[in-house]
Amino acid sequence: MTLGLDAAGAPASLLALTPQETAANAARSDGRQLALVPFGGFVYAGLGYLFYDHALVGPGIFDEESQGTGLCVRADQAVTCNRVTVNGDTILWKPDQRILNSGGLVVDDRALVYGCRRVASFSTPCTELALCRTGDWYVVSA
């Protein structure tokens, strides 16, 4: 997989806020902003799967509050990574669901099992596993 380029040939944003999220950030007056923070992923069968955190960041440099985890999928040669939506929401796992063996997602013929465990202030190792199964996108939680 390679980085995507925009029409002018400049590097394109792989994971971007929606226009509604951008407008909500502009309307905030508390110094906080929604950010999409990638932290892990894998490539399988020509598709890239990127896990990211919906985080409220600021106003201080270390101020960050997780709102939950999302997943985007990028086909080879695609410019952007398409954010997965389930029931109208791109947050697929709430922060309290980020425990090993508590969440999974099924898309087409693949089941994706996901989990993280915070071990220190700046260390949250995550595990992602791809398995085969048939179905549409849906979230599986314990």
Image (cartoon, rainbow, N blue to C red):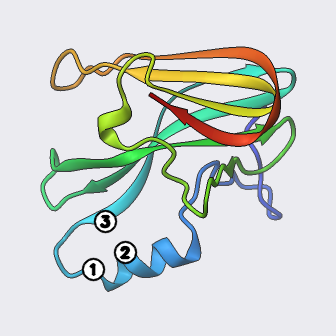
Q: Amino acid at mark 2?
A: Asn
Q: Which class describes the residues within 10 Å of circle 1: few (<14), some (14-19), or many (20+)?
A: few
SS assignment at label 2? helix
Res 31 → quadrant:
bottom left
Q: Which residue is most to the front? A: 142
Residue at image location 48% in from the left, 51% down from the top: 91
Q: Which residue is most to the bottom? A: 27
Q: Nearer the viewer, residue 59 or 99?
A: 99
Q: Are marks 3 and 2 in contact (CB under 8 Å)?
A: yes
Residue at label 3? 33
Q: Is residue 71 above or below residue 117?
A: below
Q: Amino acid at mark 3?
A: Gln
Q: Are marks 1 and 2 in contact (CB under 8 Å)?
A: yes
Q: Are marks 3 and 1 in contact (CB under 8 Å)?
A: yes
Res 117 → quadrant:
top left
Left or right for 20, reference 28: right
Q: Position of residue 3 (x, y in %)?
A: 73, 39
Q: CA distance from mark 3 to mark 2?
A: 5 Å
- Chain-order first, disc 3 or disc 2: 2
Residue at label 1? 28
Residue at label 2? 25
Q: Position of residue 75 (x, y in %)?
A: 83, 38
Q: Is residue 126 above or below residue 17?
A: above
Left or right for 36, reference 97: right
Residue at image location 61% in from the left, 59% down from the top: 87
Q: CA distance from mark 1 to mark 2?
A: 5 Å
- Chain-order first, disc 3 or disc 1: 1
Q: Which class describes the residues within 10 Å of circle 2: few (<14), some (14-19), or many (20+)?
A: some
